[in-house]
């Protein structure tokens, strides 16, 4: 074999060896650190039993109107993520934050993450808490789950408030995700490495360093686990199922929407069309990015108060 070819083979072998050692190292480090972090994650809220598993919820505040909050897809800790908004709303509302299976401190599940199953489980948790008449508020994918919940239980949901929520028919929902590769990346510790280079959605200064640390540990705990990946694989089918559906015509809608979505110029118009599909629909453009409740919690809470007072919404 000629010398250049030998050198090439040696180089490839060395690169392969370095990669193998590196991946072995990240895998071991990830396993060790994840185990240590499990003891440092702080508990909050309370558990309710749904389908033989434990679902975590937070119930806080007091007032004549119950507000149920649902998270966006993959939110590692909905309770911590919603904290700026919850602390404001809880001054004069009873607020219930639901952490679906696979989120926050809730158990995982092998039950398929179809919209039907997720909504059934959320409703069962609310029934366990005797929450049977409420304003439903949610972020991102909660727009799809909330649509199902409001349609299936019209006597319970008195209004829907969206915080940059997903809309049936929005683009790019048919993406096929490489869930197998993602699971491998998590097991190899590569997700932890990538997370270390950025704070992700934890923008703004509304979170303390301690809260950020907790949310990062929740990210390592929950992201790309089997329940998370199963829900991801169902995003396309769940959106397809929602095509052509609308909220009940007599259900009041309040939609806080990213005013200028660079990736989807039709984003605001999609929500305006959703608002006019009901008798009482209001769209509030907000200058910000997708996680509006991180950076505009006071404005969202104040806007909701003014809007709900004009409609005299009550818990019933």
Image: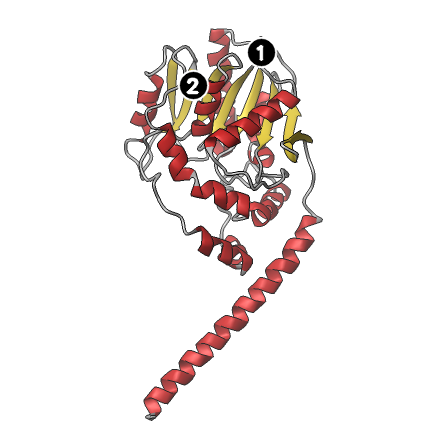
Label 1 SS: loop
- First of labels 1, 2 by sequence position: 2
Image coloring type: secondary structure
**Residue at horizontal 38 percent and vertical 28 percent from the top:** 242
- Given residues 274 and 127, the one toward you in this image is 127
Q: Is residue 184 left or right of residue 77?
A: left
**Residue at horizontal 53 percent and vertical 67 percent from the top:** 23
Q: Look at mark 2 in the image and give the residue it sits on.
A: 254
Farthest residue, direction bottom: 2
Residue 197 coordinates in the image, percent (x, y): 50, 55
Q: Look at mark 1 in the image and give the residue it sits on.
A: 315
The image quarter containing residue 285 is top left
**Residue at horizontal 61 percent and vertical 64 percent from the top:** 28
Residue 272 coordinates in the image, percent (x, y): 32, 21
What mark, if any, has residue 29 been given in the picture?
none
Q: Is residue 272 left or right of residue 110?
A: left
């Amino acid at each position: 074999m000629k010398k250049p070819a030998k050198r090439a083979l040696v180089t490839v072998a060395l690169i392969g060896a370095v990669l193998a050692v590196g991946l072995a190292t990240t895998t071991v480090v990830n396993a060790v650190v994840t185990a240590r972090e499990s003891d440092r994650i702080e508990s909050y809220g309370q558990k309710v039993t749904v389908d033989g598993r434990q679902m975590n919820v937070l119930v806080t505040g007091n007032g004549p109107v119950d507000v149920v909050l649902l998270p966006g897809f993959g939110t590692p800790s909905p309770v911590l993520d919603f904290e700026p908004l919850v602390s404001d709303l809880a001054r004069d509302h009873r607020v219930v934050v639901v952490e679906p299976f696979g989120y926050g401190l809730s158990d995982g599940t092998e039950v398929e993450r179809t919209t039907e199953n997720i909504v059934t489980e959320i409703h069962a948790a609310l029934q366990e808490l005797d929450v049977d008449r409420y304003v439903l508020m949610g972020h991102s994918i909660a727009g799809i789950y909330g649509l199902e919940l409001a349609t299936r239980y019209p006597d319970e949901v008195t209004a829907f408030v969206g915080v940059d929520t997903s809309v049936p028919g929005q683009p790019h929902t048919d993406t096929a995700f490489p869930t197998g590769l993602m699971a491998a990346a998590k097991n190899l510790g590569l997700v932890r490495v990538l997370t270390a280079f950025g704070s992700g959605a934890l923008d703004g200064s509304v979170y303390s360093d301690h809260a950020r640390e907790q949310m990062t540990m929740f990210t390592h705990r929950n992201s790309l686990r089997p329940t998370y990946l199963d829900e991801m694989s169902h995003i396309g089918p769940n959106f397809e199922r929602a095509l052509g559906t609308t909220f009940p015509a007599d259900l009041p809608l309040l939609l806080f929407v990213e005013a200028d979505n660079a990736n989807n110029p039709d984003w605001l118009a999609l929500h305006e069309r959703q608002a006019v599909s009901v008798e009482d629909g209001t769209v509030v453009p907000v200058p910000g990015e997708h996680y509006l409740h991180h950076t505009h919690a006071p404005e969202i809470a104040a806007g909701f108060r003014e809007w709900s007072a004009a409609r005299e919404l009550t818990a019933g």
